[in-house]
Amino acid sequence: MADQPTIVLVHGFWGGAAHWANVIIELHRRGYSEIRAVENPLTSLRDDAERTRTMVAQISGPVVLVGHSYGGAVITEAGNLPNVRALVYVAAFAPDAGESPGAITQENPPAGAASLVPDSDGYLWIKHTEFGESFAQDLSANDVLVMAVTQKAPLASTFGDPITDPAWRHKPSWYQVSTADHMIHPDNQRRMARRLSPRGTIELDSSHASLASHPVEVVDLIERAVTDTAG
């Protein structure tokens, strides 16, 4: 594949890089040889954006950044590096300057917000017994079990970290809306998607975990970003 970019995948809250497993397999099946998945610490937007920038800076060629959930805020903050060719948002936050994921959430609280519980160290968890209904109601019971047990909780303060210079104002963007999402209200997703003036938007009848339940459609969208920005 001529001028093939590196696809850099950025996970969100309550998961790690392995949440991209099905997307990685589908990208590889389609011939993408350069795929990276960032493992963010989820300690602050600054820390997570710097981790993503560090990985992107090590790549000599073009990059397509893909963010799921809070990972959308990360690619919004980190995506202004010169080799970033495109941004793809997967049921993701896409805040504007001065805006935070928490502020967007409060505008239209999702059903899954009631399942969040803080611990004594300031980390925010999804109750194990409610993880499936809140995050991944269209996955199998075994997949939900693994996600619930291995969830990676963010510091709750990260919700309030604002964006400085949103990359979507400078880079072509694509957006996937999950219409049955219980973690980011679908109406919030649609509003953010419209604001991006994206080159492409798709809606999937999916939970928040569309990267796991609809990898083919997600990779279709990534491929549109690759094709439309080639060369």
Image (tube, rainbow, N blue to C red):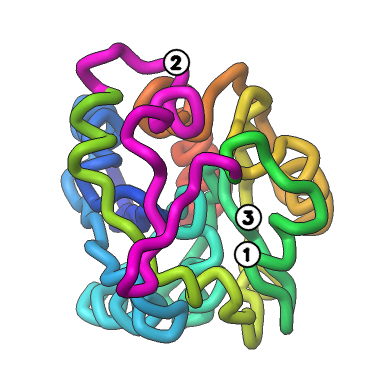
Q: Marks 3 and 1: CB-CB under 8 Å?
A: no
**Nearest the eye: 166 or 228:** 166
Q: Give the range drawn in magenta.
A: 114-143
Amino acid type of the residue tagged 1 in the rendering: Pro
Magenta stretch containing residue 136, yes or no?
Answer: yes
Residue at 36 percent of width and 17 percent of height: 139
Residue 149 occupies quadrant: top left
Helix, strand or loop at label 3? It is strand
Residue 66 visible from this viewpoint: yes
3 and 2 marks in contact (CB < 8 Å)? no
Q: Residue at image x 61%, y 56%?
A: 93
Q: Which mark is residue 92?
A: none
Q: Residue drawn 26% across and 62% down?
A: 38
x and y, in percent, of residue 23 in the image: 31, 33
Q: Distance between the residues labelled 2 and 1?
A: 24 Å
Residue sitting nearer the eye, 135 or 4: 135
Q: Mark 1 points at which residue?
A: 101
Return the residue at label 3: 173
**In which quarter of the view is residue 114 placed?**
top right
In this orientation, which residue lies closer to the viewer: 45 or 222? Answer: 45
Q: Residue under label 2, please give it.
A: 138
The residue at the far front in this view is 120
Kind of residue indicated by mark 3: Ser
Q: Is 83 drawn above or below residue 190 in the view shown?
A: below
Q: How crowded is mark 2: few (under 14 residues within 10 Å), some or many (20 or more)?
A: many
Depicted 57 relative to depicted 194: above or below = below
Mark 2 or 1, nearer chain start: 1
